[in-house]
Image: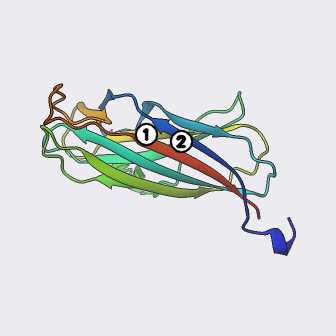
Amino acid sequence: ADAAGAGKILQVVYADITGAGSEITSGTMVDITDFKATITPTSATSTILVQCMITGGAESGNNVGYGLTEKIGSEGVAAQIGSATDPGGDSRRDALAAMGQSHGGQTLDTTLLQYKASPATTSATVYQVTVSNRTNAGAHSFYLNRPETNSDDDASVIGVSSITLMEISA
């Protein structure tokens, strides 16, 4: 793109994630089932702005970290993007966003995650949201779009999460 066209939004991909589910997490990132979107950049010099609104709950007393993976092309391997590098191998630094300590029960939190990626491709690229337990050793549950306690009454809340991908010209 010429200088006059730089920074223009070329395309937008948006998806609501309405299903309620759970993931078992430990200190490493795992995919949140079906929380992903695909974009095919029109230019290899474009950047992709990834914006996610993540609504969920966790077991009482747990902090949760969120991340992203990027998979380029059908034969590509999903690689975590945007994480801090820690020479000591501290996996807690691989999150792009975090939900503070959950109080469990009916608590439902919303976290925003934003990242600017430079995939340097015109192949279909998948951005997948990941989650990890950040507090206690062992496996713990994360609940997408619902709190830890999910009863079907007026006191219960459910949420919607979303992912938006915007291609921005160079």
- Mark 2 or mark 1: whose residue is earlier in sequence: 2
**Which secondary structure lies at badge 1?**
strand
Look at label 2 and name its amino acid.
Thr
Q: Circles 2 and 1: CB distance less than 8 Å? A: yes
Name the quadrant of the N terminus: bottom right
Structural crowding at the residue carrying mark 2, measured as other residues with C-alpha within 10 Å and reported as few (<14), some (14–19) or many (≥20): some
Look at label 1 and name its amino acid.
Thr
Residue 63, placed above or below residue 2: above
Residue at mark 1:
130
User: What residue lies at 45% left-to-right and 58% top-to-bottom?
Assistant: 84
Residue at mark 2:
69
Q: Nearer the viewer, residue 132 or 91?
A: 132
Q: Nearer the viewer, residue 49 or 84?
A: 49
Q: Is residue 79 left or right of residue 103?
A: right
Is residue 96 at least partly visible in the picture?
no
User: What residue lies at 56% left-to-right and 52% top-to-bottom?
Assistant: 50
Q: Is residue 64 left or right of residue 68?
A: left
Q: Nearer the viewer, residue 162 or 136?
A: 162
Q: How many numbered marks have been drawn onto this rendered protein structure?
A: 2
**Residue 6 picture location, percent across and down:** 77, 69
User: What residue lies at 44% left-to-right and 54% top-to-bottom?
Assistant: 113
